[in-house]
Amino acid sequence: MVKIDAIMGWKKLNLGAAITEPGSASLFKTGSWRTQRPILDKEACIRCGRCWIYCPEAAYSPNGDGYFICNLDYCKGCGICAEECPVGAITMVLEEI
Amino acid sequence: MGKRIGIEVSIAVAEAVKLCDVDVISAYPITPQTHIVERLSEIVADGELDAEFIPVESEHTAISVAAGASATGARVYTATSAQGLALMHEILFIVSSMRLPVVMTVANRALSAPISIWCDHSDIMAERDIGWIQTFAINGQETYDLTFHAFRVAEDHRVLLPAVVNFDGFTLTHVIEPIEMAEKEAVDRYLPPFQPKLRLDPDHPITMGPVGVPEIYSEARRQLEVSLLSSKKVIVEAWEEFGRIFGRYYHPIETYRTEDASTILITMGSATETAMLAVDSLRDKGQKVGLVYIRLWRPFPHEEFFEAVKEAKVIAVLDRAISYGMGGGPVFSEVKASLYNLTQRPYIKNFVAGLGGRDIPIENFIEMVDRAEFSAANGLPPTYEHLDVREE
């Protein structure tokens, strides 16, 4: 994508480009940066939540059944969840374009 | 009117900072700036000033702490020289881009190597493009006065930018000069308490200095550039108000005996007063020579500069730094750039002198005028000369 459009004009930008709305990072979806996605094998998962704890993007969240599901709008595909999973229940697979 | 006393200029600067009621001083000692922060640490330790004095482990940290403290809404001061300023380099851009009104005094000193603790302007010239307001003092009284001015302009809501006050290492820092000290009541009238527009507050969280993706970085930088360019109006206003309260008047560009001058010397910093004596001497001989000294270096006052030099046929620019590989010094480049679009451009010649504490006596300025006029009269290319270097 050619980046030629500004999000807003400089006159409307806060002083020093400060962000005055807390938690607004969630408005910025960075999942498109990903080259690999995590696939969870629910049969193998022991629902320990390490993926949720270690994810640097806080992309994982509990789904109510005790599992932790990755939100692909934010997952950058770093693979830390797969690396940290103690039972190998998460596999990183190449994103197909 | 304040009392006039004999005082070392660095100590006077510390007294000015005290009168400005700063909240945080974050500094690391380096010659020739040391006396300022040494005196400030005494002032704080003795309970004369209710401020946090943070003795950090490096200049990189000194300016980083200053940035953080300023972001919480504190009035913040620091000072440095040469290698210390160079070590601050990466953070200096962040302070201006985050619009933090930190005030810093720079005791101008040569950069290593060889190691030199003495004066030239190579330290600040390497930081020309940091986005700070930058002024130059020619003597101790000016350094003292420009300190109050720096806080007032930096914190103005139309500006909100950091400011550097430059004064020459040793030539000014360590000299005892009669300085008219300001009354606290007058300083309070001149400098209202700092009211931050945005500040870090746990109850109202904000993010300062976030990631600037390509879709917003240009706009953030444009905001900084427009703010710095338009700060000139506030800078001039604040000097006018300073004059009304303290009786001393300052301008972005200052002139000395430039009426009908066909040759004009351009200087910055303490060498200016020596150049004035050279001008007096040449005027006594009937030569039409004047002097223009640049007080406001950033934002560069193009209009005022043009007004000051427009009648001149020959201009001789002093540089106390070299822009290595360009052929000349940074002041020369700026002066030429500023006048390039004129249809009738003056002949502009550059002289590098006074590096690493080499004195620039009156005779040097007379030589600059003679050589510039000779080169112009003989149609020689206006190259730069390193004036006081031994060629053998």
Image (spheres, coloured by chain):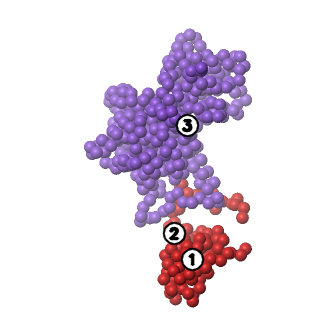
Q: Is the residue marked by circle 3 packed among few (<14), some (14-19), or many (20+) residues within 10 Å?
A: some
Q: Is residue A30 above or below residue B336?
A: below
Side of B2 where B58 appears, left or right: right
Q: Secondary structure at mark 2?
A: loop
**x and y, in percent, of residue B49 in the image:** 31, 45
Q: Is residue A1 above or below residue B98?
A: below
* Pointer 2 or 1: first along the chain: 2
Q: Which residue position is annotated with label 1? A: A82
Q: Mark 1 or 3, which is nearer the eye?
A: 1
Can residue B135 be seen?
no
Chain purple in the figure, letter = B
Q: Mark 3 or 2, which is nearer the eye?
A: 3
Q: Secondary structure at mark 1?
A: helix
Q: Which residue position is annotated with label 2? A: A23
Q: Is residue B315 above or below residue B296?
A: above
Q: Which residue position is annotated with label 3? A: B125
Residue type at tag 2: Gly
Alpha-carbon span between mark 2 and mark 1: 26 Å
Chain A palette colour: red
Q: In percent of the image, x 38 and y 46: which residue is there?
A: B25
Q: In percent of the image, x 42 and y 56: which residue is there?
A: B72
Alpha-carbon span between mark 1 and mark 3: 51 Å
Can residue B98 be seen?
yes
Locate residue B312: give its quadrant. Answer: top right
